[in-house]
Amino acid sequence: MDHAPDPAPDLSPDPAPDPAPDRAPEDVLGLLLGGPGGLGRAPAYGRTAARTDDGAPPAPAPAPAPGITIPPLYCPDALRDDPALAEVVDERLVRWAAGIGIYRGRLERLRACRFGRLMMLAHPDCDDADRLLAAAKCGLAEWAVDDHWVDEGEDADPRLIGARAALAHAVVDPVRLPARYGRQFEERVAAEPVVRAFRSSLEHLARFASPTQVTRLRYQLAVMFVGYGHEAQWRVSGRRPPVWEYLVHRYENGFFPCMVLTDPVGGYEVPAREFADARVRRTYMYAGVATCLLNDLYSMAREGPCDTSLPRLIAAEEHCSLQEAVNRTAAIHDEIMHTVEAESAALAVLGSPELGRFLKGVWNWMGGAKEWHATSPRYAPAAASASAPAPA
């Protein structure tokens, strides 16, 4: 599998040099990152493969589809793998899913996917199984939208996505209705396991996260629901989006709700002013897009030729082979990763310790996600052949 860039990026905020004796860190960041010459406008980097300990290039990732190879990706490795901790989170997550009612009849396939292991890999600064479980519940509620309303389920009809997403949002950002209509609303919620999963997961998260941190997640979930509507329009109309539109879509429907939990799971909080700073947000969001593209590459083995992903859209738009499109997707992923690495290092040095820890946590999250994608039966053909098939 892929290996971490060598040398690994130092995103630690300490020790932080004094950027200027009479200038606030925010002003220095403005000079460093703002304007057409800032790091956000850095030129595209070429492909940079990591190296193994003996200096040889790493082996390509497992084939995502027959005859297709994923090139080595510029991405960190997971910092830890604690099977015992992952097992605790996985078992508690499956019990919760059974109680809520999601993945009914598919619990063993759910267990095989190891979503709890994903959270263990993605949050190496947390050894608390309950905090990891809170993140896993939130993540699984998000995946359940895809697995129940989009790809599977008794009536996975794209024409229903708008109404279902509106119902989910009314639970995520709780509505207040007159008593008579409130009872009718609750009856509808009680009949929909996916929506109940969102409510339950947010209640668990609130034990550890501040109201501000929970609100950040609510916002990202609202954007995700917009993304599901965007994708449903493609399916209903049969329209194939251009590549640029798909990349915009990946800012809507991605891993951001999972990644935004980096600081509450770690037990700290990025100051609101820094978290809301456009320079921080563009770096964090760009990191999320990179992980979405990694997901596009690894998920090809379980998707059909009509599914919408960046490699298939590039192949159609540029009239190239699927392998060439996979290579192009990997190159775009690497270009984004280099930009995220550079901007995170600058922001971490000049920002608060909490911001530095958050940016390092996002980097680690990407490494954990890569390891999980490469080894979970949900995406890895070799792992799936040795286990029960993953839910779609």
Image (cartoon, rainbow, N blue to C red):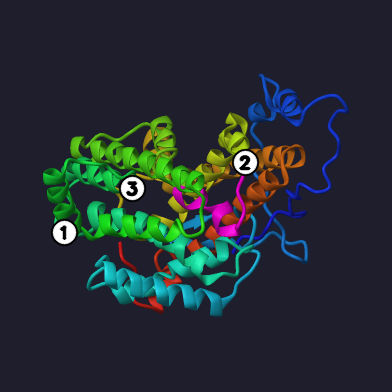
Q: Is residue 341 magenta?
A: no
Q: Secondary structure at mark 3?
A: helix
For image coordinates 23% across by 53% down, the residue present is 149
Query: From where the camera sits, is residue 272 visible?
Result: yes
For image coordinates 20% across by 41% down, the residue present is 177
Task: Quote the CA–CA distance across marks 3 and 2.
Answer: 23 Å
Q: Residues within 10 Å of mark 3 (few under 14, many from 20)?
A: many
Where residue 278 appears, as percent x and y from the top left, is 58, 30
Residue position marked by numbered label 1 in the rendering? 191
Where residue 148 appears, as percent x and y from the top left, is 24, 58
Residue position marked by numbered label 3 in the rendering? 172
Amino acid type at mark 2:
Pro
Q: What's drawn in magenta, residue-wise? A: 257-270
Where residue 307 appears, as percent x and y from the top left, is 31, 48
Task: Quote the CA–CA distance across marks 3 and 1.
Answer: 16 Å
Q: Secondary structure at mark 1?
A: loop
Q: Secondary structure at mark 2?
A: loop
Q: Is residue 137 left or right of residue 199?
A: right
Q: Nearer the viewer, residue 182 or 339?
A: 182
Answer above or below: position of 41 versus 346: above
Mark 2 / mark 1, whichever is N-terminal: 1
Mark 3 / mark 1, whichever is N-terminal: 3
Amino acid type at mark 3:
Val
For image coordinates 68% across by 37% down, the residue present is 343
Mark 3 and mark 2 residues within 8 Å of each other at the beta carbon: no
Mark 3 / mark 2, whichever is N-terminal: 3
Q: Nearer the viewer, residue 150 or 132?
A: 132
Tell which tag, 2 or 1, sits nearer the viewer. 2
Q: Nearer the viewer, residue 75 or 97?
A: 97
